Amino acid sequence: MKEAVLKKFGELYGDTQGVNVYFAPGRVNLIGEHTDYNGGHVFPCALTIGTYVAARKRADRKLTFYSMNFDRLGVVEGSLDDLTPAKEAEWTNYPKGVMWAFAGRGMEMDCGLDIVLYGNIPNGSGLSSSASLEVVTGYVLRDLYGFDVTNVDLAKIGQYSENNFNGMNCGIMDQFASAMGKKDNAIFLDTADLSYEYAPLVLDGAKIVVTNSNVKHSLVNSAYNERRSECEKALEELQTVVDIKGLGDLTEEQFEMHREAIKSEVRVKRAKHAVYENQRTIRAVAALKNNDLKLFGELMNASHVSLRDDYAVSCEEIDVLVEEAWKVDGVIGSRITGGGFGGCTVSIVRDEAVDAFQEKVGAAYKERVGRTADFYVVEIGDGPRKL
Ligand code: GLA
């Protein structure tokens, strides 16, 4: 990949003198879904796939962007003097948003940049290609302009830019997982205060299999933002009867005691998911520490049911993938992963069942949905770096 982006850079700009190449990973979340904007816990891990960027400073204030994933767009130009979101700027709104967010924190770039990018995260798969793009951009800016920021800052800046420049009110999980990834470890993050702990995830005799439904329903961002406001409203209602900062502060018992404060059935379900999912995540990590992979898998399955029935962020295609996965011998657990409405599932599958899993789930998906699913047996990789 490094060679490929460098080569492209050379083709576009004549030479590769002084060009650096950087990488930031995508992520898969094992459990803890839609908890990150509710002050709850998440348990994602960085992948070995992600976004590669070749970058070099310019003498003027121009910005040029080229994505090998969107060759049809050619070189997209911008300027440091106009860091505002624009529809026609397409994917470059992500790196521009990060530059804007740095500038807003007093870290202004004193010259422009040429960027050539290649991402090997399947587009729209819910494996955080945008977060990896934000994090790699922040990493480039830190390295080339000497900005004094930590990797946690890169995650915060990425999330801030996505919320305020790109209009997606995401939580911090994806950017954090990308910026703080560690090979063979998942990250147990408490989004209430960003305290975190790495949990070694060398699964003895099992693999993490990500299945791509290859569907992405429209209105994903608006449905996501809607869930988020439903939770905020439910929180306000609960705060009239109990002193909490986020839904993640409640145990299941406390939630059941106070749920009547929430004045709509839909919001009760949304809040219930957020509370129970957070507790499931805490239990799942404890189960993993006790080497109880079976319990971990059961909690993953319960997570899916809750996301499907109470949080309503699944869809038919994903439900088929998960149901079919549950039928296969050797599947420890399977659930939707990421924001929802399509994208991927994550499953933990015994080594000896991985082939059968792909065959059976793939065939059933084809038959029931009429589409082809893609399977990735993933490895947990490190965070962002210069290559
Ligand atoms: C998307 C968001 C994350 C998180 C997940 C759901 O990936 O970007 O912040 O909310 O959905 O868990």
Image (tube, grey):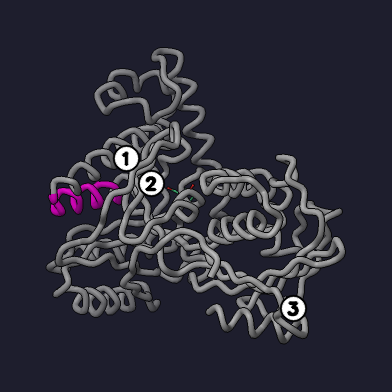
Residue 343 picture location, percent across and down: 44, 63
Which tag, 1 or 2, sits closer to the chain's start?
2
Q: Amino acid at mark 3?
A: Gly
Marks 2/3: CA–CA distance:
36 Å
Predominant SS of the magenta segment = helix
Name the residue that disc number 1 marks.
277
* Quarter of the rendering containing residue 261: top left
Mark 2 surroundings within 10 Å by alpha-carbon count, few (fewer than 14), some (14 through 19), many (20 or more) = many
Tell me whether the residue at label 3 lies in contact with that at label 1, contact meaning CB atoms closer than 8 angstroms.
Answer: no
Where disc 1 sits, the SS reads helix
| 19, 274: nearer the viewer | 19
Marks 1/2: CA–CA distance:
7 Å
Marks 3/1: CA–CA distance:
43 Å
> In percent of the image, x 29 and y 47: which residue is there?
303
Judged left or right of residue 159, residue 111 is: right
> In percent of the image, x 36 and y 20: which residue is there?
260
Mark 1 surroundings within 10 Å by alpha-carbon count, few (fewer than 14), some (14 through 19), many (20 or more) = many
Judged left or right of residue 231, residue 373 is: left
Q: Is residue 125 above or below residue 200?
A: below
Judged left or right of residue 302, residue 274 is: right
> Can residue 284 be spotted in the picture?
yes
> In percent of the image, x 41 and y 61: which residue is there?
382
| 332, 175: nearer the viewer | 175
Look at the numbered disc 2 and say if its residue's Cβ is closer than 8 Å to ligand 1: yes
Name the residue that disc number 2 marks.
33
Residue 298 picture location, percent across and down: 18, 50
Tell me whether the residue at label 1 lies in contact with that at label 2, contact meaning CB atoms closer than 8 angstroms.
Answer: yes
Which tag, 3 or 1, sits closer to the chain's start?
3
Residue 75 picture location, percent across and down: 76, 75
Name the residue that disc number 3 marks.
74
Where disc 2 sits, the SS reads loop
